[in-house]
Image (tube, rainbow, N blue to C red):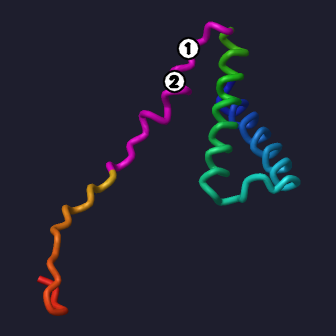
Amino acid sequence: MTQGELDYAIRQALNNFDKWNDCTGAIPKGTSWYYEAQTCIEDAVKIGAKIACEGTEADLSDITEEEKEQKFPPKPTPPELKPRIIRMGRIS
């Protein structure tokens, strides 16, 4: 399967998902759930294509481990909060 064929299969699957989602309204477009569903569909097409081409013993780690390899910046740690004492309407 060529990259172009795989891209076409993914587009068709996403178009089918959009048709279904437009009818049901199950997942609001533009939300994180919508994009997560699209990613699951893309992965399913890639997995199906790889198994169809290489058989059931195909190594799927390049598809299933893809998310772990993405570089996300670490969450900033919140600064430590010092307790403040309020005296006579003033904060010290």
Q: Is residue 75 above or below residue 13?
A: below
Query: Does the magenta run of residues contain 66?
Result: yes
Q: Nearer the viewer, residue 46 or 27?
A: 27
Measuring from the top left, give residue 31's x and y in whole percent. 63, 58
Q: Is residue 89 above or below residue 72?
A: below
Q: Which residue is mark 2?
A: 62
Residue found at the far left of this picture: 92
Name the residue at 73% across, 30% down. Answer: 5
Kindly identify the amino acid type of the residue bearing the numbered disc 1: Asp
Name the residue at 70% across, 30% down. Answer: 45
Kindly identify the amino acid type of the residue bearing the numbered disc 2: Asp
Q: Which residue is mark 1?
A: 59
Measuring from the top left, give residue 16's x and y in whole percent. 83, 43
Name the residue at 74% across, 37% down. Answer: 8
Q: CA distance from mark 2 to mark 1?
A: 7 Å
Which secondary structure, mark 1? Answer: loop
Name the residue at 55% across, 27% down. Answer: 63
Q: Is residue 32 above or below residue 2?
A: below
Residue found at the far front of this picture: 88
In the rendered image, the quadrant that contains the C terminus is bottom left
In the rendered image, the quadrant that contains the N terminus is top right
* Left or right for 28, reference 66: right
| Residue span colored magenta | 56-74
Quarter assignment of residue 89: bottom left
Q: Is residue 37 above or below residue 31?
A: above
Quarter assignment of residue 57: top right
Q: Nearer the viewer, residue 10 or 89?
A: 89
Mark 2 nearby-residue class (10 Å; few <14, some 14–19, many ≥20): few
* Left or right for 68, reference 8: left
User: Are dots 2 and 1 in contact, CB under 8 Å?
Assistant: yes
